[in-house]
Image: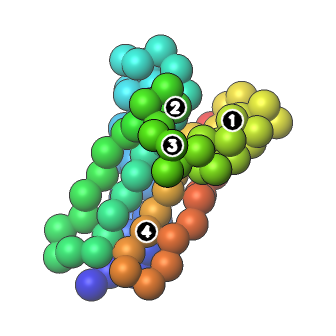
Amino acid sequence: MESIESFFKKNLRELVQVYLSEKLRHKEIGIVFINTNKSESNVYFVPISLFDKEQEELKTDVIERHKNSKNTAFFYVFDDNDSKIIEIEL
């Protein structure tokens, strides 16, 4: 299984495109979730308005980070052992 960092670096351009196109389509900020648990990675965008109660802390964190930098793409990358929010300045 590929590490979080290597997957992210290898696919950075495509991941930023996913973020930008989905943010535009939904007309709001959100976060791209990247699950690298399996042999195939799962990538999906969740608009901030669709976060559920279990994700309230993550939602608050992303909103606060967005206030500080309007031109940032947010990614939540996770596998069985680790998880992190990665911010990319656009």
Q: Which residue is mark 1?
A: 63
Q: Position of residue 9 (x, y in %)?
A: 46, 66
Residue situated in front as seen by the camera: 83 or 18: 83
Badge 3 marks a residue whose secondary structure is helix
Question: Of callouts 2 and 4, which one flags the residue occurring earlier in the amino acid sequence?
Answer: 2
> What amino acid is labelled 4 in the image?
Phe
**Residue 38 in the image: above or below residue 77:** below
Circle 1 crowding by C-alpha within 10 Å: few under 14, some 14–19, many from 20: few
Q: Which label sits on residue 53?
A: 3
Residue situated in front as seen by the camera: 30 or 8: 30
> What amino acid is labelled 2 in the image?
Ile
Q: Nearer the viewer, mark 4 or mark 3?
A: 3
Q: Position of residue 39 (x, y in %)?
A: 17, 76
**In the shown orientation, is residue 36 left or right of residue 90?**
left
Distance from the alpha carbon under mark 3 to that under mark 1? 15 Å
Q: Residue at x 57, y 66 (%)?
A: 84
Do the residues under discs 4 and 3 have CB atoms within 8 angstroms?
no
Q: Which residue is mark 4?
A: 78
